[in-house]
Amino acid sequence: MMASSYNAKEEDGRNSNSSTHGGAAVAKSKKPDNTAFKQQRLPAWQPILTAGNVLPAFFVIGLIFIPIGIGLYVTSNNIREIEIDYTGSESGSPCNDCSTNFTWNTTTPCICTVNFTLNQPFEGNVYMYYGLSNFYQNHRRYVKSRDDSQLNGNIKSLKEPSKECEPYRTDPVTKKPIAPCGAIANSLFNDTLELFHNEPNGRTTAVPLAKRGIAWYTDRTVKFRNPVGDNLSEVFKDTEKPMNWMKPVYELDPSDPENNGFINEDFIVWMRTAALPTFRKLYRIIHKNSSSTLTLPSGSYTLKVAYNYPVSSFDGRKRMILSTISWMGGKNPFLGIAYITVGSICFFLGVVLLIIHHKYDSRNNSADIPN
Amino acid sequence: DDCLTQRMMSHPQLYIPGQLNLYFSKKAFFKCAIHSCYSSLVLFFIPYAALHDTLREDGKDAADYQSFALLTQTCLLFAVSIQLGLEMSYWTAVNTFFVLGSLAMYFVVTFTMYSNGMFLILPAAFPFIGTARNSLNQPNVWLTIILTSILCVLPVVTYRFLLIQLCPTINDKVRQARATPPPPPRRTRIRRTSSRRSGYAFSHTQGYGDLVTSGRFLRRPAVVSWSPGFPPVGRATSGFSPMGRSAGYSPTGRPQSSKVPDVEATSLQMYRAIKDPPL
C-alpha cells in the first residue's frame, strides 16, 4: 500500500524562459518546483480499515485487556482496608457528644473513643488516613485562596500576602498579615487520632504512628520552605495565625524543627487540595515490624479522637481508614472491572463483526465496481 | 506503485460524494456531536472513577486536584492523537512527524511547566510543581490513560468498519479493490477515443496539475494511423511511448514535437487521449 512518488523533475520554467528570449530580463517562473514535497507526491502509507486489520486488532485488545483486568481486580481484592466513621451525627454513636457540643474557642479538646475489630491481620506497611465527605476542596475560589510565594519562604510575601487570600489575608483585629494566608490553610484538619491495640491478655498498647514521610517529596523539599532564620518564632513574629487555628504555624510541631512551620507535613498534605468531594489524606504510617510479620494482628482496637474539626454544619462526614498498599495503590476495584468489561466488549464486538464480515463479504465481492 | 491518476481516471464515480455534499451535511455534524458527547463523558468519568479514593503505590495521596487534571488532559491528548491518526488518509513522513511530535511536545511542555526551575522563578504562575513527576510514575495512571483512549476510539472504528462492510461507498469499494491487487488492465481500455482533454476536477488528493500544464496528453498517439508510404518503423503497438516523443514522423522527417524527450512517462500515457491525424 505504499504509494511511491515518481520523480518527473522537468523544468517547467523553461517554457516561459524561451518565450521571453531576447527580452530585457529573463522572467523567473513562479511555479513551485516539481519536487515530491511541493507537489504533494510524498510516499505515504494509507491506513485502510479492512477486515484483516480491524478484527485481529479487536481480538488482540480483548485478549490483552481481560488478563490485565483480572490481575487488577485480584490485586485490589487482596488489599486490606477498614473504614471507621466517627462523625458522631447519630445519637448513640461514640462521638455524638463531641459533635453536638462543639464550640469554637475551647482550650480542652473533646475526646471520644471508637472501638472496632480487625477480622484479618494487616501485613506490611499500614497507612492511616483521615477521610472527609461532602467537603469541596475543589471549589474554585477555595483552590485559589493561597499564596505559594509565601509558602515557599519568600519574606516579602510573608509580610504582604497575595490578594487571592482575601478575606483570610490580614487579621481583622490586629491588622497583621496572616501566615499562612488563605482559606485552604485556614481550614486545616486538626483532629488528632491515636490507635490502641487491646491485646487478648487485657493490656492496651499504643500502636506507633510515624508522622514523617507522608507528604510528596517535591512538596516537602521544593514547594514549601520556611522563611530563612534560625528561630521560627522570631521569623514569624509580625504575623498572625489563621483565624480558625488554635496554635500559630511555628508551633505545629515544636519537637521536630524539620516538621515545624510551613514544612509541617500534615500542613503540606492538607494544602494539596483534593479533586473530589469525598477524599482521604494520609495521616500517619504504621511501619512494618522487622521482628514479627504482622503489623496489625487481628483483634480489638480502640481509636481515640481529639474531636476538633466541625463538619456537621455542612453535613460532612469524617472517617479514619487503615489500609495496606500494593503496586496499583489502594483498594479500588473500578480499574479491574473496567478493564474486564472493555476487554469483553472488544472481544464480543470482534466476534459480531467477524460474523457480519462473513455474511456481507461475499455480497461485496460479487458487486462489481461500475466502470 | 501509486497509480492514483490511473485510479481516478478509471473510477470517475469517485467525484460523486463531493457533488452530493455527502460529507458536510447536518447529518455529519450530528454524528460528530454525538461522538463528542460520548468522548467527553468517557474522558471525565473514567479518570474520576479511577482516582476515586485511590492512593499512590507508596501510600501517599494520588487523588488530588492537580493529578486529576493532569490525568484527564493526558487522556485527552492520547485520544485526540489516535483519532487524528484514524482521520489522516495519508501518513506521509511529514504528517507522522507532526502528529507524534505534538504528542512528544505535550510531554516536554508539561514536564517543563511542572519543573522545579519554573516554580522557583514564578511561584504563583506555576503551582503544579512536581505533579507530572509524581503522577506519571504510577502504573494505574498509565493503565487509566490506555483504557480511556481505547474506549474513546472504539466506537469510531466499529462504526466505520460496519459502514464499510454493510453500505460501502464508492470510495470504500475502490480502496478495498486497491487493497487487493487490481486485475491487469484490459487491452481494450487503451483504445479510448473519447476526449479527455480536461479531465481535471477538484479532488482532495493530488491532482494532475503537472500533467495538464505539461500538455503531455495532447501528444500524438503512439500507434500511428497508417497511410501508405509510412511503415510503422518497427514501433511497438502496446500503446505508449516511454520517451514522450511523437511516434510518428512528419513527411519532412523531423520529429513532430519539439518537446524535450527526457521525460518519464506518466501512467496516463497508457490512455491515448487524442487521436489526431498526423499533421
Image: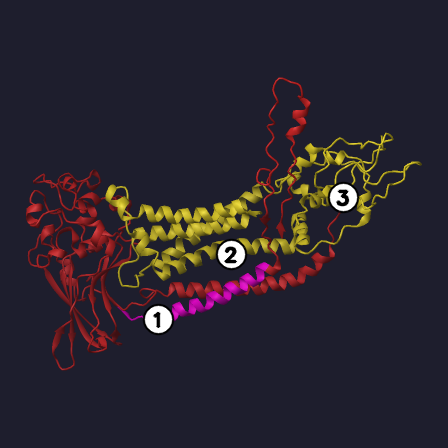
* Chain A, colour shown: red
The residue tagged 1 is A77
> For the view shown, which residue lies furthest in the bottom direction?
A201
Parent chain of label 3: B
Q: Is residue B122 visible?
A: no
Left of A192 or right of it: where is B123?
Answer: right
Q: CA distance from mark 3 to mark 2?
A: 43 Å
Q: Is residue B194 visible?
A: yes
Residues marked 3 and 2, same chain: yes
Check disc 3 and give the amino acid type: Met
* Chain B, colour shown: yellow
Parent chain of label 1: A
The residue tagged 2 is B154
Task: Give the colour scheme shown.
Answer: by chain
Above or below, A127 against A24 in this view is below
Rendered image quadrant of residue A365: bottom right
The range drawn in magenta is: A53-82
Above or below, B166 against A15 in this view is below
Left of A247 or right of it: where is A2?
Answer: right
Left of B26 or right of it: where is A121?
Answer: left
Disc 3 residue crowd, few under 14, some 14–19, many 20+, Cα 10 Å: many
Residue A54 is covered by the magenta coloring: yes
Check disc 2 and give the amino acid type: Leu
Could you tell which of marks 3 and 2 lies nearer the N-terminus?
2
Mark 3–mark 2 contact, CB under 8 Å?
Answer: no
Classify mark 2: helix, strand or loop: helix
The residue tagged 3 is B270
Find residue A253 and report its horizontal and vertical position in percent: 11, 57
Q: In this view of the protein, which residue sits in the foreground, A164 or B275?
A: B275
